[in-house]
Amino acid sequence: MSSNKAPNSGQLAGIALITFAVLLLSLSDALVKLTGAHYSLGQLILMRSLGAGLLLCLWAWARGRRLGADRPLWVTLRSLCLVAMWFFYYAALPEIPLALAAACFYTAPLWMALISRVVLGEPLGLRRLVAVIAGAVGVFLAVNPAAAMPSPYVVLPLLAAFCYALSAIITWSRCRDERPVAMAFNLNVALVCAGGGLLAALSLMDAGIEGSFIFGVWPQLGVADRAVLGLLAAFLMIITVSVAGAYRMAPAPVIGLFDNAYLVFAAIWGVAFFGQVPSPVELTGMGLILAAATVAARAGTPAPSRIAAK
């Protein structure tokens, strides 16, 4: 059977889910950047995920759904990768423009290609090799070192992209039979534990820094701040279910292709909320990253049976 057939209904549903998810995700990240000075990182992660987890419990109870995972080890490993992703990415947002953070983060399809080569032994292929090189050049241009000294914080969204790529490979290869709501609930539990753990560690070591986003402990929140957290929690519940479902319905590179819509949405929010208009050099770099990610995603994915056999 030809491998070039049109996407089936499952793939189309996965594409629709991931596009909607990245729209909400980009808006959430813009809100975090806009209001981040009111919170600490651990507080934001803990409160948002606690709210999202409670909403998931109510939704599952109302629909008679089970929240336990069938393969808890792999689902938890996936969640830990996503926990690291959230922490790396959110730690970078207050320090660099949203569009730049998005450009660095959406090297994820390139990481997927490299992980498939190194871990799964899949050939990289000429197209993916070119994509990886083009993506590296794109990151260099997006950072635009000629304009100013690059911020060291640009490393964080690159690390977030690597963690996201790992989670996508795990989802496609090991968790395709899991229910999206179970994976979403597991992720929110992991995020609550991680956020609470960070706050506890900072408190016990007396290492909290007042006014710091990363090292702050528990800033006082106003009514508007709590309302934003509630909105972010609702968004996160929808996002986590949608992303988990999308990666079950279609191969990771296919979903990764449409995942790149985040770059467009982030650029829009960056201009609308912060007046951050990328320079021509930075736009060229972002365009290269988008093109490279598209090429890497369209280069195909290992057959599920081969991945599962590893």
Image (tube, grey):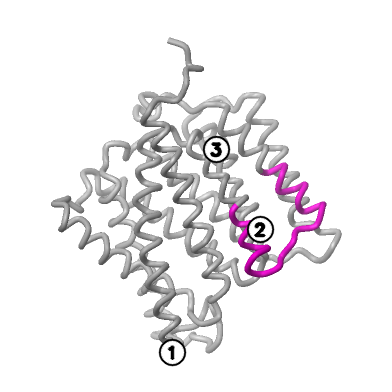
Quadrant of the drawing holding the C terminus:
top left
Residue 19 at what x, y percent from top left?
A: 48, 45
The residue tagged with tag 2: helix, strand or loop?
Answer: helix
Q: Earlier in the sequence, mark 2 or mark 1?
A: 2
* Mark seen at residue 257: 3
Residue 273 at what x, y percent from top left?
A: 63, 68
Q: Of residues 45 and 62, which is closer to you in this image?
A: 62
Left or right of 204 in this view: 28: right
In the depicted structure, whether residue 107 falls above or below residue 270: above
Identify the main secondary structure in magenta: helix
Quadrant of the drawing holding the N terminus:
top left
- The residue that appears at 19% across and 52% down in the rendered structure is 68
Q: Amino acid at mark 1?
A: Gln
* Mark seen at residue 25: none
The residue carrying mark 2 is: 99
- How far is the residue under mark 3 from the one under mark 1? 40 Å
Residue 293 at what x, y percent from top left?
A: 62, 39
How packed mark 3 is, by other alpha carbons closer than 10 Å (few <14, some 14-19, many 20 or more), is: many
- The residue that appears at 53% across and 66% down in the rendered structure is 90
Residue span colored magenta: 265-289
Q: Earlier in the sequence, mark 3 or mark 1?
A: 1
- The residue that appears at 41% across and 70% down in the rendered structure is 45
Left or right of 93 in this view: 170: left
* Mark seen at residue 220: 1
Q: Earlier in the sequence, mark 2 or mark 3?
A: 2
Residue 144: image quadrant is: bottom right
